Amino acid sequence: MKIGLFIPCYVDQLRPEVGLAVVRLFDGLGIAFDFPEAQTCCGQPFLTAGEQAHAARLGRHFDEVFADYDVVVTPSGSCAANVRRHLPHLVPGDRARETASKTRELCEFLVETNALAGLAGRFPRKVGLHASCHALRELRHGRPSESREPARPDPARQLLSTLAGLEFVPLARCDECCGFGGLFSVEEEAVSCRMGLDRLADHASAGAEIVTSTDVSCLLQLEGLARRRGSPLEFLHVAEILARGVLDGSR
Amino acid sequence: MKTARDTILAALTATRPVFPARTRGLPAPPMPADATAILRARIEAAGGRLQLASRRDWLTRIDWPVDLTPARSASIYSARPELASRGAGDPDPAEPDFDQLDLCVLCGELAVVESGAVWQVPRTSHERRAALLAEHLVVVIEGDALVATLHQAYERIDLAAVGFGWFLCGPSKTADIEQALVLGAHGPRSMSLVWLRDEAAEDEPRPT
Amino acid sequence: MGHVSRAREFVADAERTTWHDRALWFVRAKRDAAADLVPDWEALRSEASAIKREALERLPELWIEFEDQAIRAGAVVHWARDAQEHNAIVARLLTERRVTRVVKSKSMLTEECGLNPHLESLGIEVVDTDLGERIVQLRGEPPSHIVMPAIHLRRGEIGETFERTMGAPNGLDDPDALTAIARRDLRARFLAAQAGITGVNFAVAETGSLVVVSNEGNVDLGTALPPLHIACVGLEKIVPAQRDLAVFLRLLARSATGQAISAYTSHFRGRAAGRELHIVVVDNGRSRLLAEPDFREALACIRCGACLNTCPVYRRSGGHSYEAVIPGPIGSVLETARDPVAHAELPHACTLCGSCSEVCPVRIPLHQQLLAWRGVLARKGIHPQRRRLALRLAAGLLARPGLLRIFDHFGRRVARALPSALLEGLARPWTRERALPVIPAESFRTQWKQRARTSNASGDVPSSGGDEART
């Protein structure tokens, strides 16, 4: 299976350690992969801004770059959701449809391939799992609190649950949005910050030491608010926790 | 000259949306085993009461929201033969001659377990006004009067034969002031559903 | 002013925002609890969605059938192409009968048409009888929610309004006492009214019946006492058969307030002895929306308000921030269709979290429609102006890997060299309340390249300890 790693543009530029954690994790698990360097952006920020032409252009580039891979893995629920749901509408043709359907968020890929089977990891910390809206409601990772469909597993939660000592803190609102929403974060800045602060207060009163998510965009939003307020909360992507927990044990 | 009706119907006819195919047909949920308990819970959640009694002696057995002794001179509109109206005026005038009533007793047709509601068809507009202007409302159903859900209710009702009918669930209420529940917003402050059955003891409807 | 500014004002009062958010979340939670008690909840939503789409495919036949049935039963049916015609029809019916005192129950359609001001300009008194509507009427404000019009007001504010308008004692803020005062006042108005105007929740084609629901009983007091009932109904409110009502009525109150069913679910058909029923069927842009493939599903809306209650943005900005008759997610779809220029900010007042689509009882894909609106507004050039150029530049950069490498290398060095105060200043509004992310020394792609070079040189694959670099 030829695996192509897609690192979202903002992870590449602002949080490379998340990408490096994925690399470390894949190396440690013996998963062979490639990082095609011509990749740039899946186009999501442009689509959500209503700029469909730009989004289509970037989508075509994404499709080109990953044409020869069997699966595309990305440590981002929102990028995976964007590619799966929107790429076939933005870029015509069968190949784009295939590219869309072969794109996986990191945790769902690890669960599907049973990559952590038999490994006893350890991460004895109190963790607040922030549900990425796109992973939850588009990819159906877990069951949204509004829904009464049969319960569905959340791959991120499944993987983190294998780490001994990791305690999920109970949130008052388990899947309310962090308020990032792309350009919303700067255009509707007041509401965006209020939403993020409410999430932080929930994690803090639930006793979280670390806030984690499958989306770095959510973490940048929450961490930005937290740092400005001198909060002691730490913010780690699920990949970083898995890499430390599985490969380093209790370090 | 084109009328508004013509224009609108022409616009609708010209626009024939076709939506993606979908399946229809939802099975109506069956009568639950603990129907009476569920009905009671739903009515109580709506601020009402369910009272069970036998046809023989319900008048003296149930908990009335007003004192019925004539000395107390409560005004009553009653659609039940066992209880006489008093001070509620002639049922036949064009104008209501009361703007306040202590108690209204109606005959209901069926009760919907899942909703906690009773289907009632006022016989006259006077009766409908009485139901709205009374401080306390009692609706009486008899015998095999329970249906599981609204699906079964609408199978038993024929709206083409009904000029006015309503589902009533609990008393009039509002939560428009800071979501605080207040009973008796404009209409009755209390509502009891009285179910008369042949046996006074538990005679549960059979689950389906 | 626009949603951005008004929302900013709203959020500035942190304590009030907390209160408003919690009040609406409470209603969302009641909806969840009610759905828990309905085992076929999701199947019910699918069925409701299917019925509505079938109805939208057959509107002309259904309305002709409805009209035929309604007329047979003695009702009079009028047709209005737009708000002006609607208002003129209602006004004519009233003035012909020399009606000067009207009671009205909640109808978003009559809000949309601006009926009250029109009637008042003709010397006709209109009293809104839903308690929440009455409160905002007495305050001269629009409703802020389609089901709970006064949800934005605290009891003290309502008490002040009642003191000013109905002589309530100073400082009274107990909901029971305030409601009792309104009850007395409105009872007198019901008794004195010469006509009652209502909206319609569902029109049933098969029988010519109208279904109107309320918790207070004001729909019924407003139609049982006066001799004239005028029912205003939008084209999209029709359902084919009476059995369809079961599906919607099992969903409506649960979605709206978490109740199993409203206190009063009234079914009207034709005229009763001595009374008149006039039905005004209104288009006002609905047939035009029906022609829009991306947005026509919004016509399935049954006005439950669940999308407002669940929307994290609505809860923290309040209905008045939307400056539209209907606020919240469904409002942002419908109102933008009505006037894309005036409401250009509304589809962007959203993080696309998708919660609205999950609660919609008729499965309107609201967040997909809001995204689609953004595309329409951008193509039409109606669109928050500032960012188009910035987005074009960003897209141009990201489409060219070579250019991105240069930006990555040099842009990074420049940004890291800038004094943080300057960088923060340049990056407003992100930095008003948030710290900027620390700009890393190297991007991922640079580190990946370095690692590849190292492994090529030494033949070994080094461990990438990079995730320890950030502390």
Image (cartoon, rainbow, N blue to C red):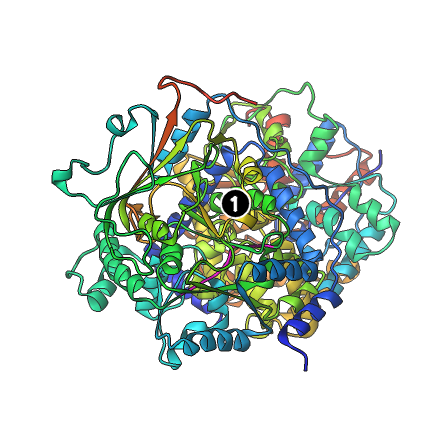
**Left or right of residue C172: residue B162:** right
Q: Position of residue B200 (x, y in %)?
A: 35, 19
Q: Residues within 10 Å of mark 1 (few under 14, many from 20)?
A: many
Is A204 or C1 nearer to us in this picture? C1
Asked whether C398 falls inside the magenta stretch, the response is: no
Q: Position of residue B202 (x, y in %)?
A: 39, 18
Image quarter for residue A170? top left
Q: For the point 33% across and 56% down, which residue is it?
A: C16
Is A8 or B167 nearer to us in this picture? B167
- Specify the segment rendered in magenta: C196-204
Q: Position of residue C340 (x, y in %)?
A: 60, 72
**Left or right of residue C341: residue C253:** left
Asked whether C199 falls inside the magenta stretch, the response is: yes
Chain designation of label 1 = C
Vertically, is B51 above or below C122?
above
**Label 1, on which residue?**
C249
Circle 1 sits in a helix, a strand or a loop, which is it? helix
Vertically, is C257 above or below C338?
above
Vertically, is C122 above or below C374?
below
Q: Is residue C324 visible?
A: no
Q: For the point 77% across and 58% down, which residue is it?
A: A58
Q: Position of residue C162 (x, y in %)?
A: 23, 63
Most common secondary structure along the magenta stretch: strand
What count of labels does the image hold?
1
Q: Is residue A156 visible?
A: yes
Q: For the point 61% across and 68% down, which residue is it?
A: C337
Vertically, is A151 above or below C224?
above
Is B64 or A106 nearer to us in this picture? B64
**Left or right of residue C413: residue C431:** left
